[in-house]
Amino acid sequence: MDGLVQKLAEQLLRQGKRLALAESCTGGMIAAACTGLAGSSRWFDRGFVTYSNAAKIECLDVPAETLERHGAVSEATVIAMAKGTLEHSDADIALSVSGIAGPDGGSEAKPVGTVWFALSDKTGFTNALVEQFTGDRKQVREQAVQFALKLLIEHTR
């Protein structure tokens, strides 16, 4: 994972851009990976751990209606989280993540391992995608962190 963070750091520094995160199911693991790299203060602005719906509303201005209509683990919610992260930070790029790490909480429509990601940046770009990870809670979260870092690397090429 250190190699992924190093690559992301190099790309952000080369472009003079800063990153902010909004994490739910990963609970700050992506931010921890990023800030584990010396010098990360030059490219990492901040991270929000918005685990509860109330935190998503209060910290990121996710509309309560979005959460009620679509749920916390949804395209609409992660898009609102990413946009809210940009608005409440000094970052150029924001990534958000919300999912069901397990072992409980899954449903037929959203089984354990379902994780939504969204990217938003100051150019107006916003995109969301869903992944289905396998394994126990720890494995799902670790896979989500790696996927998020790879997504950021791809976006900042």
Image (tube, rainbow, N blue to C red):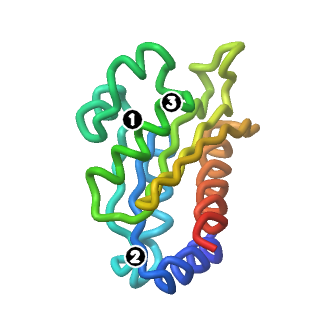
Q: Residues within 10 Å of mark 1 (few under 14, many from 20)?
A: some
Q: CA distance from mark 1 to mark 2?
A: 24 Å
Check disc 3 and report its element: helix, strand or loop.
helix
Above or below, 4 against 58 in this view is below
Q: To which residue does mark 2 refer?
A: 43
Q: Is residue 79 visible?
A: yes
Left/right of residue 34 with respect to residue 154 in the rendered view: left
Q: Which of the two residues, 69 or 55, is positioned nearer the viewer here?
A: 69
Q: Is residue 31 visible?
A: no
Q: Residue at x 71, y 13 (%)?
A: 108
Q: Are marks 3 and 2 in contact (CB under 8 Å)?
A: no
**Which residue is labeled 3 in the image?**
76
Residue 51 badge: 1
> Of label 1 and label 2, which has the lower sequence position?
2
Which quarter of the figure has residue 116?
top right
Front: mark 3 or 2: 3
